[in-house]
């Protein structure tokens, strides 16, 4: 046989050869076990018959043993039994065996050549015999002719060969085919990983309409690759957004510093420039902190700190926290809370989400307006609604406002990360964020 020189094809042959060898060894082992069982079964049957003869003649009175022995031989129509009754000196008393074997091992049966006296034309025959002592200084030789046994074993052996040869051929064929198929499947995965490592994340494994175990594995790998591609795309998008969002404030900061340093002539002027620069730096640090916060929320390990949270108490604390700021801005903060029991979550994160919603309502609502915070119970679970007197978010932008750095066209404040944080916290808890159609209201539905 000529083996391929290509390493990949050699690997395929090794897979097929290994599986074929395993199946061949299994077939040979089963054949050997069957042969051993058949051989052992014949031997056990003979030894059982010999033991019965010894027991029978031990229980038979000495004066009746000769007659009983002749009756047993008369009933042996197949002439495959050997029985011989001998005295202490080895002289034949009765039976169809001329003499005892030269060597008579004690205990178990053994194969020996016997000299039959009632088989015309046959002086020597091979039999499995046993010699057992009897009372009255007598010994009994009991044996069974092995001709029929050997013929039966030869029949078993021929049957095994007839079944084993096709079985070995099938094992070799199936092993090579199955091994090569498995090697091709593994090679498909290997080629896919090579393309992915080269940067092509669009590659996927083929999955049949009715997949087998390997097809199910391929489907799971494809799902994993979909998730990986989504995360990498999201990461690239975040990097682009960060570069875009940070470039403008950094450019503005540099321009102000340059102009301020050129125009400043006194210590007070330099201090004013520094104060303005610190305000811009704080805004940039706030953007970075918000992004790090979003990354932390995407790690679901935070769920290990979840515990029962009294939602009414938490929303009431958020209202108390924002009332002084609302009074300073001339905004009425109205909180209507209904006890709704507890939810399972992180209290600090839920407080942050509700605080962001209240901050947005106070920031983007009309001056001197009213911000309403309502906690109610519904069939879906507790609902926290924050509403203001403004026009609300346009319907065509509601799916976009939860993306990083996205700001409504009328919004010129902030970095566009507030609602992204709220959405990340809601997703972490399995809650839903809903925007009202007829008013400027955002609802956090805390599904139990």
Image (tube, rainbow, N blue to C red):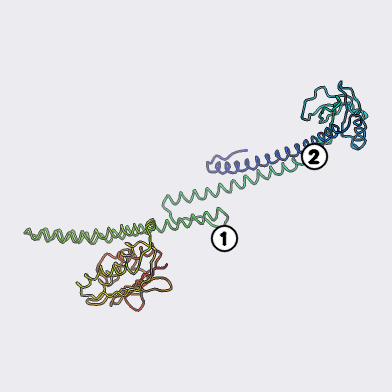
Count the labels in the image.
Answer: 2
Callout 1 secondary element: loop
Which residue is at 65% across, 40% downward?
A: 25
Callout 2 secondary element: helix
Q: Where's residue 287, x and y in %?
A: 27, 60
Q: Nearer the viewer, residue 37 or 152?
A: 37
Tag 1 and tag 2, C-beta contact below 8 Å: no
- Mark 1 vs mark 2, foreground winner is 2
Q: Where's residue 134, x and y in %?
A: 84, 28
Answer with left or right where residue 433 lies relative to residue 137. Answer: left
Displayed quadrant of residue 3: top right
Which residue is at 10% across, 58% downward?
A: 270
**Which part of the image, by quadrant, shows the C terminus?**
bottom left
User: Residue most toward the left?
Assistant: 266
Which residue is at 42% across, 50% downward?
A: 198
Q: Where's residue 197, x and y in %?
A: 43, 49
User: Residue most toward the bottom?
Assistant: 438
Using a 10 Å C-alpha cutoff, classify the residue at mark 2 as few (fewer than 14 neighbours), some (14 to 19) or many (20 or more): few
Q: Nearer the viewer, residue 121 or 219?
A: 121
Residue 312 drawn above or below residue 65: below
Which badge, 1 or 2, comes first in the chain's sequence?
2
Displayed quadrant of residue 80: top right
Q: Where's residue 86, x and y in %?
A: 88, 25
User: Residue most toward the top?
Assistant: 89
**Which part of the image, by quadrant, shows the N terminus?**
top right
Q: What residue did someone put label 2 on?
A: 155
Q: What residue did someone put label 1 on?
A: 209
Residue 237 drawn above or below residue 189: below
């Amino acid at each position: 046989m000529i083996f391929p020189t290509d390493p990949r094809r050699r690997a395929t042959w090794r897979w097929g050869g290994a599986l074929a060898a395993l199946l061949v060894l299994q077939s040979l082992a089963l054949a050997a076990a069957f042969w051993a069982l058949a051989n052992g079964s014949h031997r056990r049957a003979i030894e059982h018959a010999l033991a019965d003869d010894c027991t029978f003649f031990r229980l038979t009175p000495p004066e009746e043993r000769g007659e009983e022995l002749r009756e047993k031989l008369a009933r042996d129509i197949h002439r495959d039994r050997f029985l011989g009754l001998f005295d202490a000196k080895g002289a034949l008393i009765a039976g169809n065996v001329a003499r005892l074997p030269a060597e008579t091992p004690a205990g178990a049966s053994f194969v020996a050549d016997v000299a039959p006296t009632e088989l015309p034309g046959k002086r020597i025959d091979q039999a499995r015999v046993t010699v057992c002592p009897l009372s009255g200084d007598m010994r009994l030789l009991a044996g069974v002719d092995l001709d029929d046994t050997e013929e039966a074993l030869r029949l078993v052996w021929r049957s095994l060969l007839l079944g084993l040869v096709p079985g070995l051929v099938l094992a070799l064929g199936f092993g090579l085919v199955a091994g090569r198929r498995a090697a091709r499947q593994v090679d498909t995965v290997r080629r896919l990983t090579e393309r992915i490592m080269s940067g092509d994340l669009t590659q996927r494994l083929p999955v049949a309409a009715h997949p087998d175990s390997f097809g199910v594995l391929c489907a799971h790998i494809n799902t994993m690759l979909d998730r990986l591609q989504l995360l990498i795309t999201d990461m690239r998008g975040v990097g682009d957004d960060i570069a875009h969002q940070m470039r403008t404030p950094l450019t503005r900061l540099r321009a102000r510093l340059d102009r301020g340093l050129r125009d400043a002539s006194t210590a007070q002027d330099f201090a004013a420039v520094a104060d303005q620069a610190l305000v811009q730096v704080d805004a940039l640090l706030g953007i970075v902190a918000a992004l790090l916060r979003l990354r932390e929320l995407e790690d679901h390990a935070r769920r290990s700190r979840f515990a029962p949270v009294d939602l009414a108490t938490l929303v009431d604390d958020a209202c108390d926290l924002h009332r002084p700021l609302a009074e300073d801005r001339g905004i009425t903060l109205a909180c209507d809370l209904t006890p709704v029991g507890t939810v399972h979550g992180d209290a600090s994160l839920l407080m942050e989400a509700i605080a962001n919603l209240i901050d947005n309502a106070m920031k983007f609502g009309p001056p001197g307006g009213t911000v309403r915070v309502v906690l109610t119970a519904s069939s879906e679970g507790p609902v926290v609604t924050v509403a203001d007197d403004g026009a609300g978010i346009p319907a065509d932008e509601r799916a976009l406002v939860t993306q990083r750095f996205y700001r409504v066209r009328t919004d010129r404040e902030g970095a566009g990360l507030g609602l992204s944080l709220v959405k990340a916290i809601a997703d972490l808890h399995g809650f839903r964020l809903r925007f009202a159609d007829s008013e400027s209201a955002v609802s956090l539905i805390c599904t139990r």
